[in-house]
Image: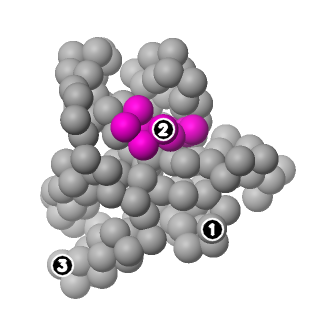
Amino acid sequence: MEKPRIILDTNVLVAAFRSTQGASFLLLELLSSETFSIHFSLPLLLEYEEVLQREALLSATELDKFLKRLHSIGTMHKIYFLFRWFLSDHDDDMVLEIAIASNATHIITFNKKDLKPAEMFGIQVLTPKEFLQYLGVLP
């Protein structure tokens, strides 16, 4: 099996930092495992930062440490094209853009309905639990 190339939607990070008991947190625990590779763009990293600050789920120091770790283990991509207003929720357009630019195999999200059009590009849209089942980490 090819090593999955994933994009994490911001809602997965919010869920992971709200509870250490769920699949989202387990997925973050596996970031350094080399089971999959994570990809992002600068606008997506900035969204992660903005939403996690707004939700007040981490201290400023913890957030900075998390973002630096993510940046060090993931792959940053520049976006040279826009798919704006392609999805029904326009906030998700940047997730689709980075998924296409990085040749991602999966988008991990709780918002499967709005990101379903990504499947036209050969990108699977899964919840954290579904992705961990795909990897064989969860039954």
Residue lying at the far right in this picture: please name it. 139
Residue 121 spot, x, y in % from top left:
50, 21
Q: Nearer the viewer, mark 1 or mark 3?
A: 1
Left or right for 43, reference 74: left
* Above or below for 85 versus 109: above
Separation of disc 1 and disc 3 at Cα?
Answer: 27 Å
Q: Label 2 amino acid? A: Asn
Q: Can residue 126 be seen from the camera position used here?
A: yes
Disc 1 or 2, which lies upstream in sequence? Answer: 1
Residue 96 spot, x, y in % from top left:
36, 31
Residue lying at the far front in this picture: please name it. 80
The residue where tag 2 is placed is 103
- Residue at image x 78%, y 47%? 1
Q: Secondary structure at mark 3?
A: helix
Q: Label 3 amino acid? A: Ala
Q: Label 1 amino acid? A: Glu
* Above or below for 124 versus 3: above
Disc 2 or 3, which lies upstream in sequence? Answer: 3
Is 102 magenta? The answer is yes
Disc 1 or 3, which lies upstream in sequence? Answer: 1
- Residue at image x 51%, y 47%? 6
The residue where tag 1 is placed is 34
Q: Can residue 15 be seen from the camera position used here?
A: no
Separation of disc 1 and disc 2 at Cα?
Answer: 17 Å
Is 66 magenta? The answer is no
Few, some or many residues within 10 Å of mark 3 (<14, 14–19, 20+) = few
The residue where tag 3 is placed is 60
Which residues fall within the magenta stretch? 99-107
